[in-house]
Image (spheres, helix red, strand yellow):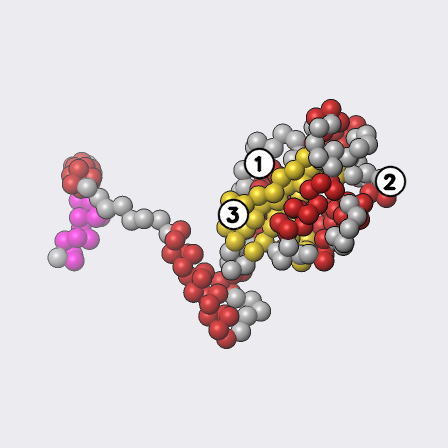
Amino acid sequence: MTRKVVLDTETTGLEVESGHRVIEIGCVELIDRRPSGREFHRYLNPERSIDAGAVAVHGITEEFLRDKPRFAEIAEEFVAFIAGAELLIHNAAFDTAFLDSELRHAGGTFGRVADHAAVVDTLALARQKYPGQKNTLDALCKRLGVDNSHREVHGALLDAHLLADVWVAMTAGQGALALGLDGADAQAEAIRVAAWDASVRPRVRRATEADTAAHAARLAAIDKVSAGSLWEREEAAGA
């Protein structure tokens, strides 16, 4: 079983060095490349003002956050959710810098994000796969056919769901190659992928008697205006 957590944050501004804080965390768990249904989503009171430019991006106001918990109140729960996972984050350096700062302010022995989970930057992956192209989340959604029409403003949980779909589409096929696996591990991965492929194959729908009759009537109509349909000539030749 491979466990990944797709993570996104929203903040009061762009510079963590200027004292900006996290105001929303959204996490979506993937088990073997599929959403498990487990999520972690919290709005947070940053105890400071929010830049007007940031509000324009995510639409989260100071008034809305006034009764929300402080990060220190949810830090333990957050760390427990990401523990042992591989984190998928778009432009990971930005989010981890803010989260590391929050963990530090929370006190105790929380350490840093990297102390609890491996971090994969999906922006770096996208730049490797699509060099010289625009690789924002919106651009990747458009390129990979992920529907983001409901994304009017940024939101941590919404963007985590979109990034999960983007990552699955962007890395499709890699699991079947069992890259980096040897022996029994590679065989187990191949079996898992084969089972997954089988589970998503479309069901075959057999023609009903009405379908067959309609098909025969259509061929008869074609035969009236032609020198016999190709379909019927092929059938006669094979008889």
Q: Residue 17 location, x and y as percent? A: 86, 44
The front one of 100 and 149 is 100
Secondary structure under tag 3 reads strand
Neighbor class of circle 3 (other Cα within 10 Å; few <14, some 14-19, many 20+) is some
Pick out the residue farthest to the top: 63
Choose mark 1 or mark 3, whichever is in front. Answer: 3
Q: Residue 88 location, x and y as percent? A: 64, 51
Q: Is residue 231 left or right of residue 51?
A: left
Residues at marks 2 and 3 touching, judged by CB atoms closer than 8 Å: no
The front one of 103 and 193 is 103
**Disc 2 marks which residue?**
18
Quadrant where the C terminus is found in the figure: bottom left
Kind of residue indicated by mark 1: Asn
* Secondary structure mostly taken by the magenta-highlighted segment of the chain: helix
Q: Is residue 229 left or right of residue 143?
A: left
**Disc 3 marks which residue?**
35
**Disc 1 marks which residue?**
148
